[in-house]
Protein backbone atom coordinates (compact mmCIF):
# COMPACT_ATOMS: atom_id res chain seq x y z
CA UNK A 1 0.00 0.00 0.00
CA UNK A 2 1.40 3.35 -1.06
CA UNK A 3 1.92 5.90 1.68
CA UNK A 4 0.19 9.28 1.47
CA UNK A 5 2.11 11.89 -0.49
CA UNK A 6 3.91 14.57 1.50
CA UNK A 7 4.13 18.31 0.95
CA UNK A 8 7.48 20.09 0.69
CA UNK A 9 8.49 23.69 0.01
CA UNK A 10 11.44 25.16 -1.88
CA UNK A 11 12.60 28.75 -1.54
CA UNK A 12 15.27 29.93 -4.02
CA UNK A 13 17.22 32.51 -2.01
CA UNK A 14 20.56 32.79 -3.80
CA UNK A 15 19.75 35.83 -5.95
CA UNK A 16 22.01 38.84 -6.14
CA UNK A 17 19.15 41.31 -5.69
CA UNK A 18 20.78 43.72 -8.15
CA UNK A 19 17.52 45.59 -8.84
CA UNK A 20 17.00 46.16 -5.14
CA UNK A 21 20.47 47.33 -4.18
CA UNK A 22 23.96 46.74 -5.47
CA UNK A 23 25.21 46.10 -1.94
CA UNK A 24 22.25 44.64 -0.02
CA UNK A 25 20.14 41.52 -0.50
CA UNK A 26 16.40 42.12 -0.35
CA UNK A 27 15.70 38.84 1.47
CA UNK A 28 17.82 40.03 4.41
CA UNK A 29 16.11 43.37 4.96
CA UNK A 30 14.25 43.61 8.27
CA UNK A 31 10.51 44.09 8.76
CA UNK A 32 9.09 44.03 12.29
CA UNK A 33 12.26 42.50 13.69
CA UNK A 34 12.53 39.65 11.19
CA UNK A 35 14.18 39.38 7.80
CA UNK A 36 12.07 39.11 4.67
CA UNK A 37 13.29 35.52 4.27
CA UNK A 38 12.15 34.61 7.79
CA UNK A 39 8.70 36.09 7.12
CA UNK A 40 8.48 34.15 3.85
CA UNK A 41 9.56 30.82 5.32
CA UNK A 42 7.29 31.26 8.33
CA UNK A 43 4.28 31.87 6.08
CA UNK A 44 5.00 28.58 4.28
CA UNK A 45 5.24 26.87 7.64
CA UNK A 46 1.58 27.64 8.25
CA UNK A 47 1.08 24.57 6.05
CA UNK A 48 1.71 21.02 7.24
CA UNK A 49 5.08 20.65 5.51
CA UNK A 50 7.21 17.53 5.63
CA UNK A 51 10.16 19.90 5.19
CA UNK A 52 11.39 22.99 3.40
CA UNK A 53 14.59 23.69 1.48
CA UNK A 54 16.31 27.07 1.24
CA UNK A 55 18.66 27.31 -1.73
CA UNK A 56 21.29 29.88 -0.70
CA UNK A 57 24.43 31.32 -2.24
CA UNK A 58 27.74 29.62 -1.56
CA UNK A 59 29.08 32.81 0.04
CA UNK A 60 26.02 33.18 2.26
CA UNK A 61 27.04 32.90 5.91
CA UNK A 62 23.95 34.67 7.24
CA UNK A 63 20.95 32.46 6.41
CA UNK A 64 21.92 29.70 8.82
CA UNK A 65 22.08 32.18 11.72
CA UNK A 66 18.41 33.17 11.39
CA UNK A 67 15.51 31.92 13.51
CA UNK A 68 13.08 29.97 11.35
CA UNK A 69 9.95 28.26 12.58
CA UNK A 70 10.04 24.44 12.55
CA UNK A 71 13.82 24.45 12.24
CA UNK A 72 13.70 20.65 12.57
CA UNK A 73 12.16 20.59 9.07
CA UNK A 74 14.67 23.03 7.59
CA UNK A 75 17.16 21.99 4.92
CA UNK A 76 19.78 24.03 3.06
CA UNK A 77 21.32 23.48 -0.35
CA UNK A 78 23.50 25.57 -2.61
CA UNK A 79 21.74 27.78 -5.10
CA UNK A 80 22.82 28.46 -8.66
CA UNK A 81 23.59 31.31 -11.02
CA UNK A 82 19.93 31.84 -11.95
CA UNK A 83 16.69 31.29 -10.07
CA UNK A 84 15.90 28.19 -12.13
CA UNK A 85 19.29 26.69 -11.23
CA UNK A 86 18.57 27.21 -7.54
CA UNK A 87 15.17 25.57 -7.87
CA UNK A 88 16.63 22.60 -9.73
CA UNK A 89 19.38 22.18 -7.13
CA UNK A 90 16.73 22.11 -4.41
CA UNK A 91 14.64 19.56 -6.32
CA UNK A 92 17.70 17.36 -6.80
CA UNK A 93 18.35 17.64 -3.05
CA UNK A 94 14.74 16.74 -2.30
CA UNK A 95 14.91 13.73 -4.60
CA UNK A 96 17.25 12.12 -2.08
CA UNK A 97 14.81 12.38 0.82
CA UNK A 98 11.35 12.63 -0.79
CA UNK A 99 9.23 10.54 -3.15
CA UNK A 100 8.91 11.70 -6.75
CA UNK A 101 5.12 11.72 -6.30
CA UNK A 102 5.33 14.10 -3.34
CA UNK A 103 4.08 17.63 -3.89
CA UNK A 104 6.43 20.59 -3.83
CA UNK A 105 5.67 24.30 -3.51
CA UNK A 106 8.22 26.72 -4.97
CA UNK A 107 7.97 30.20 -3.50
CA UNK A 108 9.98 33.37 -4.06
CA UNK A 109 12.14 34.40 -1.11
CA UNK A 110 10.96 38.00 -1.54
CA UNK A 111 7.22 37.28 -1.25
CA UNK A 112 6.67 37.53 2.51
CA UNK A 113 3.02 38.60 2.33
CA UNK A 114 1.33 35.49 0.93
CA UNK A 115 -1.62 34.58 3.14
CA UNK A 116 -2.36 31.25 4.78
CA UNK A 117 -5.75 31.24 3.04
CA UNK A 118 -4.15 31.50 -0.41
CA UNK A 119 -1.61 28.82 0.45
CA UNK A 120 -4.32 26.46 1.67
CA UNK A 121 -6.49 27.08 -1.41
CA UNK A 122 -3.56 26.39 -3.73
CA UNK A 123 -2.66 23.12 -2.01
CA UNK A 124 -6.26 21.91 -1.87
CA UNK A 125 -6.84 22.73 -5.54
CA UNK A 126 -3.71 20.95 -6.76
CA UNK A 127 -4.24 17.88 -4.61
CA UNK A 128 -7.96 17.56 -5.34
CA UNK A 129 -7.52 17.94 -9.10
CA UNK A 130 -4.19 16.05 -9.15
CA UNK A 131 -2.84 18.83 -11.34
CA UNK A 132 -0.07 21.41 -11.10
CA UNK A 133 -1.26 24.85 -10.01
CA UNK A 134 0.00 28.36 -9.35
CA UNK A 135 -1.26 31.43 -7.56
CA UNK A 136 -2.09 34.23 -10.00
CA UNK A 137 -4.32 37.28 -10.31
CA UNK A 138 -6.23 38.56 -13.36
CA UNK A 139 -4.59 41.55 -15.05
CA UNK A 140 -6.64 44.63 -14.12
CA UNK A 141 -4.86 47.50 -15.86
CA UNK A 142 -5.04 48.41 -19.53
CA UNK A 143 -2.01 46.98 -21.33
CA UNK A 144 -0.14 48.73 -24.13
CA UNK A 145 2.29 47.26 -26.63
CA UNK A 146 5.07 49.82 -26.95
CA UNK A 147 7.69 49.94 -29.69
CA UNK A 148 10.72 52.15 -30.34
CA UNK A 149 10.86 55.67 -28.88
CA UNK A 150 8.17 54.75 -26.36
CA UNK A 151 5.42 54.91 -28.99
CA UNK A 152 2.27 52.89 -28.39
CA UNK A 153 1.49 50.43 -31.18
CA UNK A 154 -1.76 49.04 -29.79
CA UNK A 155 -3.79 48.17 -26.74
CA UNK A 156 -3.49 44.50 -25.77
CA UNK A 157 -6.59 42.67 -24.63
CA UNK A 158 -6.32 41.70 -20.98
CA UNK A 159 -9.35 39.40 -21.07
CA UNK A 160 -7.34 36.16 -20.93
CA UNK A 161 -4.25 37.48 -19.13
CA UNK A 162 -3.23 36.59 -15.58
CA UNK A 163 -0.22 37.78 -13.60
CA UNK A 164 1.69 34.81 -12.22
CA UNK A 165 2.69 34.73 -8.57
CA UNK A 166 4.18 32.11 -6.29
CA UNK A 167 3.93 29.58 -4.77
CA UNK A 168 3.78 27.33 -7.80
CA UNK A 169 2.99 23.70 -7.04
CA UNK A 170 3.65 20.41 -8.82
CA UNK A 171 4.71 16.87 -8.09
CA UNK A 172 8.44 16.65 -7.40
CA UNK A 173 9.31 14.24 -10.20
CA UNK A 174 7.18 16.05 -12.77
CA UNK A 175 8.67 19.47 -12.02
CA UNK A 176 12.26 18.23 -11.86
CA UNK A 177 11.87 16.46 -15.21
CA UNK A 178 10.24 19.51 -16.81
CA UNK A 179 12.99 21.89 -15.72
CA UNK A 180 15.76 19.51 -16.81
CA UNK A 181 14.19 19.05 -20.26
CA UNK A 182 13.62 22.77 -20.74
CA UNK A 183 17.20 23.63 -19.76
CA UNK A 184 18.56 20.91 -22.06
CA UNK A 185 16.81 22.62 -24.96
CA UNK A 186 17.88 26.13 -23.90
CA UNK A 187 14.33 27.23 -23.13
CA UNK A 188 14.08 30.38 -21.03
CA UNK A 189 12.49 29.46 -17.71
CA UNK A 190 11.07 32.44 -15.82
CA UNK A 191 8.95 30.39 -13.42
CA UNK A 192 8.05 26.77 -12.73
CA UNK A 193 4.89 26.96 -14.83
CA UNK A 194 6.89 27.90 -17.93
CA UNK A 195 8.88 24.66 -17.58
CA UNK A 196 5.71 22.64 -17.06
CA UNK A 197 4.12 24.32 -20.08
CA UNK A 198 7.13 23.32 -22.21
CA UNK A 199 6.51 19.61 -21.51
CA UNK A 200 2.74 20.03 -21.99
CA UNK A 201 1.97 19.45 -18.32
CA UNK A 202 -1.43 21.01 -17.47
CA UNK A 203 -1.21 23.92 -15.03
CA UNK A 204 -4.19 25.71 -13.55
CA UNK A 205 -4.36 29.12 -11.92
CA UNK A 206 -5.73 29.65 -8.44
CA UNK A 207 -6.77 33.24 -7.85
CA UNK A 208 -4.51 34.83 -5.27
CA UNK A 209 -4.41 38.33 -3.83
CA UNK A 210 -2.84 41.54 -5.04
CA UNK A 211 -1.04 41.99 -1.71
CA UNK A 212 1.16 38.94 -2.45
CA UNK A 213 3.81 41.32 -3.76
CA UNK A 214 7.36 40.48 -4.73
CA UNK A 215 9.93 42.83 -3.25
CA UNK A 216 11.97 43.89 -6.26
CA UNK A 217 12.85 47.55 -5.70
CA UNK A 218 13.75 49.42 -2.54
CA UNK A 219 10.36 51.14 -2.23
CA UNK A 220 8.63 47.73 -2.30
CA UNK A 221 10.07 47.09 1.16
CA UNK A 222 7.95 49.85 2.71
CA UNK A 223 4.86 48.53 0.90
CA UNK A 224 5.55 45.02 2.25
CA UNK A 225 5.95 46.48 5.73
CA UNK A 226 2.53 48.15 5.49
CA UNK A 227 0.89 44.98 4.12
CA UNK A 228 2.31 42.78 6.87
CA UNK A 229 1.25 45.30 9.50
CA UNK A 230 -2.28 45.37 8.06
CA UNK A 231 -2.50 41.57 7.85
CA UNK A 232 -1.30 41.14 11.43
CA UNK A 233 -4.06 43.46 12.66
CA UNK A 234 -6.82 42.00 10.50
Image: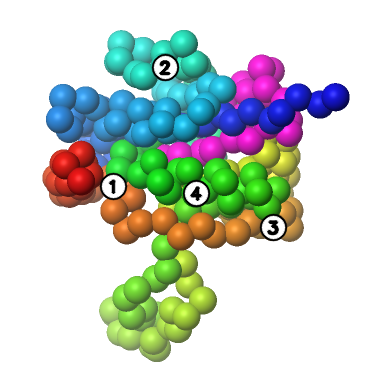
Q: Which numbered dot is residue 121?
A: 4
Label 4's element? Answer: helix
Task: Give the class, few, some or many, for how many residues have Cα within 10 Å of label 3's Cα (few <14, many ≥20).
Answer: few
| Mark 3 to mark 2 CA distance (whole Å) | 32 Å
Q: Position of residue 132 (x, y in %)?
A: 64, 50
Q: Which numbered dot is residue 71?
A: none
**Camera-side residue of 117 and 191:** 117
Residue 107 included in the magenta stretch of the image: yes
Residue 168 included in the magenta stretch of the image: no
Note whether residue 221 is visible. Answer: no
**Residue 49, placed above or below residue 119:** above
| Mark 2 to mark 4 CA distance (whole Å) | 22 Å
Label 3's element? Answer: loop
Query: Magenta stretch?
Result: 90-108
Q: Which numbered dot is residue 216?
A: 1
Label 1's element? Answer: loop
Q: Are marks 1 and 4 in contact (CB under 8 Å)?
A: no
Residue underneath mark 3? 202
Res 204 → quadrant: bottom right
Residue underneath mark 2? 70
Q: Position of residue 198 (x, y in %)?
A: 69, 56
Q: Earlier in the sequence, mark 3 or mark 2?
A: 2
Task: Give the class, few, some or many, for how many residues have Cα within 10 Å of label 2's Cα (few <14, many ≥20).
Answer: few
Q: Give the residue drawn at x 30%, y 11%.
A: 65
Would residue 104 appear left or right of 63 to someone viewing this image?
right
Label 2's element? Answer: loop
| Mark 1 to mark 4 CA distance (whole Å) | 25 Å
Give the label, 1 or 4, closer to the camera.
Answer: 4
Give the label, 3 or 1, closer to the camera.
Answer: 3
Amino acid sequence: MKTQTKLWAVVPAAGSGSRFSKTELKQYQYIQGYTVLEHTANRLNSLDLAGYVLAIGEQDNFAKTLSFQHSDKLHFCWGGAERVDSVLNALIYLSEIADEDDWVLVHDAARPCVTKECLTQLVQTAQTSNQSAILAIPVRDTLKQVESQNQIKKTVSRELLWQAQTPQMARLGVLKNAIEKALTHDITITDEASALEYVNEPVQVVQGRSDNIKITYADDLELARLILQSQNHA
